Amino acid sequence: LPEARLFSLKGEDMSTQELYTKGARVWLPDAAAVWKAAEIVKGFDGKTLEVEDEDKQRVVLTIDAPEKLPPLRNPEILIGGNDLTSLSYLHEPAVLHNLQVRFCNNNVIYTYCGIVLVAINPYEELPIYGNDTIFAYRGQAMGDLDPHIFAVSEEAYTKMERENMNQSIIVSGESGAGKTVSAKYAMRYFATVGGSSTETHIEKKVLASNPIMEAIGNAKTTRNDNSSRFGKYIEIDFNSRFNIIGANMRTYLLEKSRVVFQASEERNYHIFYQLCASADLDELQDLQLGDQTTFHYTNQGDSPHIAGVDDAHSFQTTRNAFTLLGFTENQQQMIFRILAAILHLGNVEVVQGGERGDDTECCMVQPQNPHLVTMCALLGIDKEQISVWLCNRRIESMREVITKPMTADQATFARDALAKHIYARLFDWIVSRINKALSFKDKVNRFIGVLDIYGFETFETNSFEQFCI
């Protein structure tokens, strides 16, 4: 056995020396470009390897273990292929280089890696998602045509038809990679090929849920102007003829902290800015809204606008989606009243010192504070009571009830916690109403699930949200 092991190692060494000979091409780590190409000028002798990079700089690498050898480059004939598994060497630099060639040189954003579709966000609209493209992929096996989100969708739909089994598509990646848009295109594919004129246009309602969820669950971040700040799983339900008959949505990990705080160059949820941009509408006059820069919950990021986005127009799109999904005019007005109340709550000032002004252990909110008065009017609550309980907390023991005053910092924290709680409950209620609108009485035969998960994030300072992701 020891001799056999030694022979195996010798064979492996010979193979390594044959691969790393003069003229062979390798990848070298680079601080600026991540990886840069190089060519071997003196073959591997078991200890060192001499290479010359693209800048004609020669470097002698000391190799103390076989795994320390630089990754080999693929033959040029394989570069730019539409399936990464066809590469001779499948490692990080090979994957990145192939994707770079396809994206920068060939102007294509999709590449296969077996049954996985790799997508690069072009940050612009491409004319490759029309109905003509959908019907071109209908009935085609995955791999027959160029890589596309519609090919993955067709594969899921076909497997559901032929094998009569539920399917799921998982859309994963870092923040700003285009996951939400990819999920929307997959849903559009199912709505097109699975729609039926005999149904109640449920496929249109499924698509109508997108602008609502983006308004209340998406926000501008430093990486993405339309970043999903929650996870979403949608089950699209089909009958025995494989027509869409309904859908069901589950949400995860809504970023509640964004309601009360935004980092520099970021925004709160889109719906707040849509409301402020539409404040001059007659039906919104009672909300007492104005420019978004006047509200604490929308001005902290100092970035109230998104290039190319008209918040007032987006608000009309959101309202149309609400109407299509069966939200009555009264329900919509109540939603807007609650959202406006949250903005006014953020402007309620907590004064340190209490009524006397010299007690550092207590604080107060003026009952006549204009934002407090407006918030209470919108929510239908008593301003005297809320002004007291924003600054005090109630402690119940076995024998007595104690009212303990809070400091200004504690009261501000409690105010923000109340705003986050109200928004989260409203968010959940809207999702439940959407699910009710998308439900169907008949028995569901099969479903296709689309999981649009949170984008991976790593910042210099990470919060609890990044930990959860």
Image (cartoon, rainbow, N blue to C red):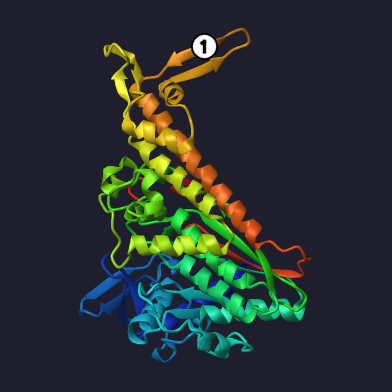
Q: Quadrant of residue 249?
A: bottom right
- Residue at 78%, 66% (x, y): give it: 442
In this rendering, the answer to whether 88 lies above or below 251 is below
* 10 Å crowding of disc 1: few (<14), some (14-19), many (20+): few
Q: Position of residue 207 (x, y in %)?
A: 55, 69
> Which residue is farthest left?
56
Q: Position of residue 297 (x, y in %)?
A: 34, 43
Q: Which residue is mark 1?
A: 402
**Number of numbered discs overlaid on the protein picture:** 1
Q: Position of residue 402 (x, y in %)?
A: 51, 11
The answer to whether one can see residue 350 in this image is yes
- Residue at 27%, 14% (x, y): give it: 357
In this rendering, the answer to whether 32 lies above or below 286 is below
The answer to whether one can see residue 10 in this image is no
Quadrant the N terminus occupies = bottom right
Front-lying residue, 379 or 23: 379
Disc 1 secondary structure class: strand
> For this view, does 184 lie left or right of residue 361?
right
Q: Amino acid at mark 1?
A: Ile
Front-lying residue, 406 or 323: 323
In this rendering, the answer to whether 143 lies above or below 207 is below
> For this view, does 184 lie left or right of residue 221?
right
Front-lying residue, 246 or 40: 246
Q: Position of residue 310 (x, y in %)?
A: 32, 64
> Which residue is farthest top?
399
